[in-house]
Amino acid sequence: MAANPIPPVPDVHGEQPRLPSEAVPELYRQILDLVAELERTGHRREAARRRSAAIAAYSRGWNEASRRRLEHMAASMTQRLAGPTVRDRLHLG
């Protein structure tokens, strides 16, 4: 019995749906950019922790589960970066 293929994932920019194997490398690159921004804004420990988690997710396989894990990580990091930075909090106190 053949396994069901993983359905393509719709692209956020309205382009043709993409397979997880196409989306995972892009998400990983986005996360590395977000990690760099975390470091730049003073969140070095968190950046190191999230980099390690991204590497682990990327290394497990380029499948739907990895895509979802990386999407969740990117959204969480984007939300984190939208809040006040460590430097901002230090200057407020």
Image (cartoon, helix red, strand yellow):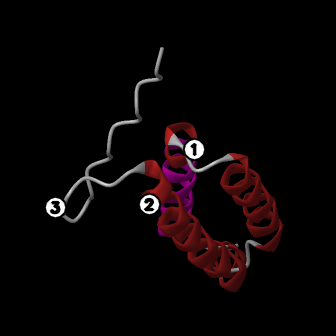
| Vertical order, 70 against 39 (above or below) | above
**Left or right: where 25 falls relative to 54:** left
Tell me the CA gap for discs 3 and 2: 15 Å
Bin the neighbour count of mark 2 within 10 Å (Cα to Cα): few under 14, some 14-19, many 20 and up.
some
- State the residue position of label 1: 69
Please give the name of the residue rendered at 80% of the width and 59% of the height, measured from the top-left corner. Answer: 52
Is 62 in front, or is 35? 62
| Vertical order, 5 against 53 (above or below) | above
**SS at badge 1:** helix
Bin the neighbour count of mark 1 within 10 Å (Cα to Cα): few under 14, some 14-19, many 20 and up.
some
**SS at badge 2:** helix
- State the residue position of label 3: 14
Is 46 in front, or is 8? 8
Image location (x, y in percent) of residue 14: 16, 61
Residue farthest top in this picture: 1
Please give the name of the residue rendered at 72% of the width and 79% of the height, measured from the top-left corner. Answer: 39
Q: Are marks 2 and 1 in contact (CB under 8 Å)?
A: no
N-term mark: 2 or 1: 2
**SS at badge 3:** loop
Image location (x, y in percent) of residue 47: 74, 68
The type of residue carrying mark 3 is: Gly
Name the chief secondary structure element in magenta.
Answer: helix
The type of residue carrying mark 2 is: Glu
Residue stretch in magenta = 68-84
- State the residue position of label 2: 22
